[in-house]
Image (tube, rainbow, N blue to C red):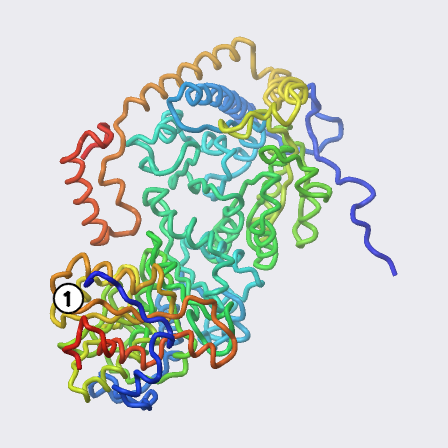
Amino acid sequence: MRFIEESPEKRTLCYQVLNDDGQTIIGSNYQQISKEVAVRMYRDMVTLQVMDTIFYEAQRQGRISFYLTTNGEEAINIASAAALALDDIIFPQYREPGVLLWRGFTLQEFANQLFGNKADYGKGRQMPIHYGSNKLNYVTVSSPIATQIPQAVGAAYSLKMENKDSCAVTYFGDGSTSEGDFHAALNFAAVMEAPVIFICRNNGWAISTPTMQQFRSDGIVVRGQAYGIRSIRVDGNDTLAVYSAVHAAREMAIREHRPILIEALTYRVGHHSTSDDSTKYRSVDEIEHWRMARDPVTRFRKWVRMNGWWSDEDESQLRIDVRKKVVDAVQVAERVKKPALADLFTDVYDRLPSNLHEQEALLRDTVMKHPQDYPPDVPL
Amino acid sequence: MLGIIRQKVGCRCTPASILGQSLPRTWPALSAPRSFSSAAKQMTVRDALNSALDEEMSADPKVFLMGEEVGEYQGAYKISKGLLDKYGPERVRDTPITEAGFTGIGVGAAYYGLRPVVEFMTFNFSMQAIDHIINSAAKSNYMSAGQISVPIVFRGPNGAAAGVGAQHSQCYAAWYGSCPGLKVLAPYSSEDARGLLKAAIRDPDPVVFLENELLYGESFPVSDEVLDSSYCLPIGKAKIEREGKDVTITAFSKMVGYALQAAEILSKEGISAEVINLRSIRPLDRQTINASVRKTNRLVTVEEGYPQHGVGAEICASVVEESFGYLDAPVERIAGADVPMPYAANLERMAVPQNSNVLSASVGEPGNLMCPEYF
């Protein structure tokens, strides 16, 4: 009689390509990328950083109600997006705006969503950072944790049934893996042989809960095998490693009709959201170490510089340009009109039912009679 | 006092002595003639649902069925009989036992191109998947401003069955009926089952389709029109099952049968009852209900679910708001008792409406000063 140990003797290895100095580790096997793609990836990583800084600031100034940064997870965002194709369907959590950025969502489009103005594709219905774009195959962010994971499996199943040459990709954090939806999704994906890539951003913290209080397994990667799913652990701050792992995962998912689990180890450098002050439960030294010494953007910059593809001048010019663009986008978004009263009622159903027609007419009458009780910036 | 809503709860408000005074002691169980005209063919509700699924799957390759035991086992209640052989395991998908899992997968599949029909073995188990139904299916079209529609049907037996206790015997009509973004249908007859299930599958919005286990085996007459593969009923329209002029009785699902039986007995007493089969809980056909009440001036609502915030409560509110001046008597609500369903057969029977409740409510309680003219 022999019981299987609760944990293996050795932890699962973590796939890396770049060391902290941005040099490729000798003998590492990775997917080559061109200068053009590498520079574009780097530019988007910087854009994401700058965008976060300014939007965060806008929230602090009370101009938007809520924000949530991606600081420290720029490599997972941009490198995974770069390794996918546009027709791959993204089921995000909420810390993956970089995927949208890579797919061509403009800074103005981000700002419009944050301000919930008329130009927002969600017509001002979702709280900030709950982006969504049909055109870019990016499903509107869902607030309840982990609901997107089984939904991604469902979308993958529909791709498989329609013989499409693409996959579904879902992102989630370490905390999400405690939700039943995570387990249901992995089990179903394996059984249904669905072409889906599960990308777990294990950033160490679920708001204030550290991974030691979240689970006792060797991270997330080992769960894959338990469900019969091929899995890999990757250094999430290593742009080339994330790119290579996602690239390979996509090939397997689509060619072999199988799910793949990727655990990307990283660190949430920012607070959970603007509703959180993480210095209350973790040390400033720890945050600073990851922000400075382990920063994925710096590491990738060293590599693109070493290749002679990037200069200090490029760097300062880019940061100045992006900063200006984001500030402009905020100012424009703030001035765009808010959604009209009618937008309160549309899209509950495919066609407006009679009770909503009545409610809309009633509300319009009431606003006309008592304008002082209603916001003046809603077009009637 | 006219505004006071009195409610009938199970049998508790209708002592046998009262029944004995004014109404026959025995009821011709399920023998009352139904209001269908000269239709020759008979069809069970089970076959009606099965044929509707079959025809819609045949017409649209995007339609697929998923749930526990829907394939090899042909459905816990055999609603999917023969479909696995006909459409294969990709389109008649047996799933692992995780309601949250397969509901989430259905919603995701609906986001991207497919039209899933998700079967719950009973709607009680849909509680394990409620987040996907409410937070995702019902809200995604709105939150995405029309970018993500969710053409999905959640179906299965709802409400009280027989001898299966609290966790298999609850009516969810009022729960789902209170949620914007969902459409909620409850068929009674085979005609309803065919026409409404086809409508639900073709609809671009998420539909909760509440069947009744005890009706699956019942046969109803069906016309050639109902049997035609193009047959489809409008969502949001009630059906007047029987016309009358003295009192309106609204009901849905199994309770329509009770209402029809009560109407038949009442007619022998010289009372002409109009029976409305709601068919659609959301949207609710307020127009048909109010038009009927304006004609009959009296209303009885019947449901197996709980009285508080129930379907009857909503109907009552609608009639009080829109047709208050037409009411000659307080509205009577008949509903299940406010208790989780007990297992013991005698208690179970006491907890849900019986024919006698519908009858006594329709004629008013003896000694009730509000409507003495009924006697």
Relative image position of residue A144 (x, y in whole percent):
49, 44
Q: Secondary structure at mark 1?
A: loop
Q: Give the labeled residue for mark 1.
A: B327
Three-letter code, disc 1 = Leu
Quarter-of-image position of residue A27: top right
Relative image position of residue B167 (x, y in whole percent):
51, 67
Relative image position of residue A4 (x, y in whole percent):
81, 54
Please tell me whether residue A87 is drawn above or below residue B101 in the rendered image. above
Pick the residue in front: A65 or A303.
A65
Quarter-of-image position of residue A76: top right
Pick the residue in front: A120 or B217.
B217
Residue B218 seen in this snapshot: yes
Is residue A130 shown left or right of residue A30? left
**Image point 50% across, 78% down: which residue?**
B163
Is residue B286 shown left or right of residue A85? left
**Image point 33% across, 33% down: which residue?**
A120
Quarter-of-image position of residue B154: bottom left
